[in-house]
Image: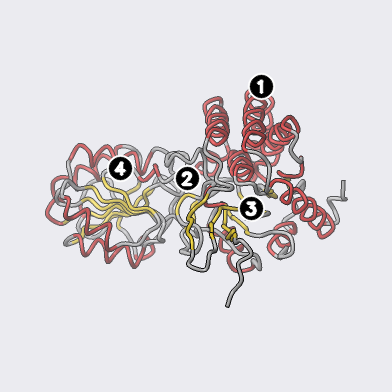
């Protein structure tokens, strides 16, 4: 093993090994990849107590670092979350293999037969914070799409991620696939991140998954292409045509189910016609649930709220806070989201089909929802088994990045002694 103190040499070695593994993975069989993922799932299940003990070390480290309750929640594993990791691995294993899929096929008058076929991207670098489950999600999705991956988890999840990575490598070994297909940076040294961002010869794309600081750093400094979202500034607009019970259920779930994920609601917009009725009920329910409601001048009159400042519009709290504002109509809501949103996920609550259609048509967030909690902004909930992240850019991948989004394509052209005049 390369000395972990010599970071450039360490990363160069990982890059070279990943590139060799990617060349072999590109034509690995569907059966072998599924076998590796199912074996990894079994390993996670059988090593559950070891994973939990490792996670206890990580939680202690996180508390010493002064992580917020929301960040500690991201870091924490329990039996239920390990069961979700196992379910995700098995779900990805059972999905159709995107590699080799014929996207389009046609004949030309020249006699050429042309196919556009899915092919792996190559080597993917994943840089993430806190959440140890990303180790399993990213490893599984990259493998499914025939890509090698270099995982650089956060210092907080170092022990948990280490055991989960070992389970993935065990799956590769059991299936006879190259063990270097899923590599992990074995150091907490931040210099490894800087090295990854410049590995243009061996890494084909970088996926950062974490807070604004990490993602902003990657987007500013990467020389390798990036799939990323900077922030999840998620809006929920309560239209005058909203069903009160649905609105109450969805708003509470969107904000309070898990506050530290990128699909958590951060701003509540309420149509003026229902501000004094449904709007007041929603604010009261949020306050009762322990949410700090940063309210505009209309809603700030309600008990338990705090006055909003300009800084609250377009803020990602990732905590038990939400901004709340009354808007004149749906167009005012759309205008507010265009200014303050991050292009991640935005929702409308309404029974009015025309209003929903207008919201969907006039906003261009990666995910738009109607009458559903924004906490569903997740690849697993989209049927992808898991996700490697949410992409808010408009090139190549957008929204939840699953196995299909981790492929490119090539053209296969066949003739019969065909020449061009």
Q: Is residue 254 above or below residue 313?
A: above
* Front residue of this view, candidates 172 and 186: 172
Q: Which label belongs to residue 260?
A: 2
Label 2, label 3: how many angstroms apart (C-alpha)?
Answer: 18 Å
Q: Nearer the viewer, mark 1 or mark 2?
A: 1
Mark 2, other Cα within 10 Å: few <14 / some 14–19 / many ≥20: many
Which residue is painted at 72% across and 35% down in the image? 172
Q: Which secondary structure, mark 2?
A: loop
Q: Secondary structure at mark 4?
A: loop
Residue at image mark 1:
46
365 vs 143, nearest the viewer: 143
Q: Position of residue 147 (x, y in %)?
A: 65, 49
Q: CA distance from mark 1 to mark 2?
A: 29 Å
Q: Earlier in the sequence, mark 1 or mark 4?
A: 1
The numbered dot on residue 127 is 3
In x, y percent, where is residue 75?
A: 58, 39
- Label 1: which secondary element: helix
Q: Which residue is mark 4?
A: 372
């Amino acid at each position: 093993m390369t000395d972990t103190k010599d970071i450039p040499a360490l990363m160069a070695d990982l890059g070279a090994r990943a590139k060799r593994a990617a060349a072999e993975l590109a034509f690995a069989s569907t059966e072998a990849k599924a076998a590796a993922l199912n074996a990894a799932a079994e390993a996670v299940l059988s090593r559950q107590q070891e994973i939990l003990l490792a996670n206890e070390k990580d939680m202690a480290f996180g508390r010493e670092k002064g992580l917020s309750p929301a960040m500690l929640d991201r870091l924490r594993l329990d039996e239920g979350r390990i069961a979700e990791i196992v379910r995700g691995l098995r779900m990805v294993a059972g999905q159709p293999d995107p590699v080799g899929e014929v996207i389009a096929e046609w004949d030309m008058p020249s006699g050429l037969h042309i196919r556009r076929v899915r092919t792996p991207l190559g080597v993917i670098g994943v840089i993430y914070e806190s959440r140890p489950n990303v180790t399993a999600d990213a490893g599984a999705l990259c493998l499914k799409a025939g890509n090698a991956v270099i995982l650089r988890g956060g210092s907080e999840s170092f022990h948990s991620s280490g055991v989960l990575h070992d389970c993935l490598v065990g799956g590769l070994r059991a299936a006879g696939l190259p063990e270097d297909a899923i590599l992990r940076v074995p150091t907490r040294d931040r210099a490894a991140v800087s090295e990854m961002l410049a590995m243009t010869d061996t890494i084909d794309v970088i996926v950062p998954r974490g807070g604004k600081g990490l993602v902003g750093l990657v987007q500013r400094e990467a020389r390798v292409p990036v799939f990323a979202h900077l922030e999840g500034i998620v809006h929920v607009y309560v239209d005058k045509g909203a069903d009160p019970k649905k609105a109450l259920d969805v708003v509470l779930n969107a904000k309070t189910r898990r506050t530290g994920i990128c699909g958590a609601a951060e701003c509540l917009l309420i149509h003026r016609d229902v501000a004094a009725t449904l709007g007041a009920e929603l604010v009261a329910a949020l306050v009762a649930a322990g949410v700090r409601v940063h309210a505009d001048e209309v809603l700030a009159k309600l008990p338990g709220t705090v006055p909003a400042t300009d800084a609250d519009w377009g803020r990602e709290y990732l905590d038990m806070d939400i901004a709340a504002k009354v808007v004149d109509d749906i167009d005012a809501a759309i205008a507010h989201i265009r200014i303050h949103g991050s292009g991640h996920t935005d929702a409308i609550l309404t029974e009015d089909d025309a209003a929903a259609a207008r919201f969907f048509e006039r906003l261009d967030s990666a995910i738009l929802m109607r009458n559903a909690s924004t906490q569903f902004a997740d690849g697993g909930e989209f049927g992808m088994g898991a996700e490697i992240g949410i992409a808010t850019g408009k090139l190549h991948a957008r929204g939840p990045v699953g196995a299909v989004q981790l492929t490119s394509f090539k053209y296969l052209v066949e003739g019969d002694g065909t020449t061009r005049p």
